[in-house]
Image (tube, rainbow, N blue to C red):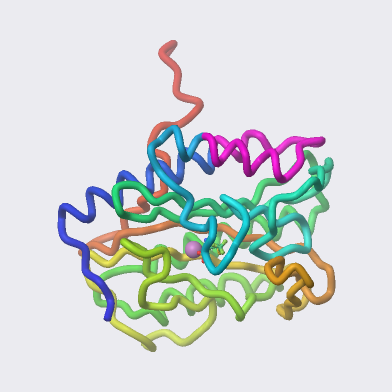
Amino acid sequence: MIVIKTPDEIERMRAACKAAAETLAAVAREVQPGRTTAELNDVAAELIAKLGGKSPFLGYKGYPGHICVSVNEEVVHGIPSKRRVQYGDIVSLDIGIILDGFVGDNATTVAVGVVEARTQQLLQVTQQALQAGIAAARAGNRVGDISHAVQTTVESQGFSVVREFVGHGVGRKMHEEPQIPNYGRSGDGPKLKPGMTLAIEPMINAGTSDVVMLSDGWTVVSADGAPSAHFEHTVLVTDGDAEILTWLRKSPYESKAR
Ligand code: MF3
Ligand code: CO
């Protein structure tokens, strides 16, 4: 069963998602050469607490971090550690927050300085795929329309879709129905209705789509060692364009001097 959120629940989703987006932006700014991924985790943990929330990741099936930090060929679920971020890396941050009973979930991949041209293109294509997926998240469309939009955006540009992990409904729980694969056929799957809240999250590889789980039981890496990117937004399905709940409305570049 796919939960349709009430207006009150939608307001609470907006608040949780805003907090998740603020935390993601704040941690993204800290991704600098020399920083350990554990330090990034600590920055997130502090801010999440300050915002009055909790990490829905911590303790989930025994997951040991407040956030996931996945570097270069790491696809998702990288565990914060003593590893130091280096110039030329890409760093995927996956950050959720549970606030007032509702979960906001989002992810981004940050380039540390100048990265290889194909890696830069990977980041652009993955963002584009997320935007295409969001554009397809309209009432009357089906989940498969989102999946198809993501897949065609990625594959038409020579990149590959990770199949083992999917987007998902999100609300009182981090993972609700429906599952949202990043590949599939238009017209397949459940119909989208206003009031559904969905986490759309393409995980895209520069090389093979195959992935391998490391011996820590969490970190997922690309099978060929090529870089991987991950962007995620939580969105609200409406009668028109989806509302991107984890969009930061206030630009950091806004200034009074205008
Ligand atoms: N944000 C991830 C998702 O959408 C959750 C991370 S898995 C965890 O599925 F174990 F770290 F929580
Ligand atoms: Co998610």
State the residue lying farthest toward the top: 257
236 over 161 or under it: above or below: above
Which residue is drawn at the image coordinates 32% and 84% (left, top)? Answer: 190
Which residue is drawn at the image coordinates 53% and 51% (left, top)? Answer: 95
Instruction: Measuring from the top left, give residue 98's x and y in whole percent.
Output: 39, 51
Which residue is drawn at the image coordinates 60% and 62% (left, top)? Answer: 63
90 over 22 or under it: above or below: below
Relative to 151, 34 lies left or right = right
Instruction: Measuring from the top left, give residue 113's x and y in whole percent.
Output: 78, 39
| Count of numbered marks | 0
Which residue is drawn at the image coordinates 81% and 43% (left, top)? Answer: 84
- Near-viewer residue (77 or 73): 77
Which quadrant of the view contains residue 18?
A: top left
Q: Let me know if residue 32 is in the magenta part.
A: yes
- Near-viewer residue (39 or 139): 39
Task: Quarter of the image for the C terminus: give it.
Answer: top left
Which quadrant of the view contains residue 213?
A: bottom right
219 over 44 or under it: above or below: below
Please state the extent of the stretch shown in magenta in the rendering. Answer: 26-46
Instruction: Measuring from the top left, give residue 104's x and y in whole percent.
Output: 40, 53
- Near-viewer residue (257 or 18): 18
Instruction: Measuring from the top left, give residue 15's x and y in whole percent.
Output: 31, 44
Q: Let me know if residue 28 is in the magenta part.
A: yes
Task: Quarter of the image for the N terminus: give it.
Answer: bottom left
Relative to 69, 66 lies left or right = left
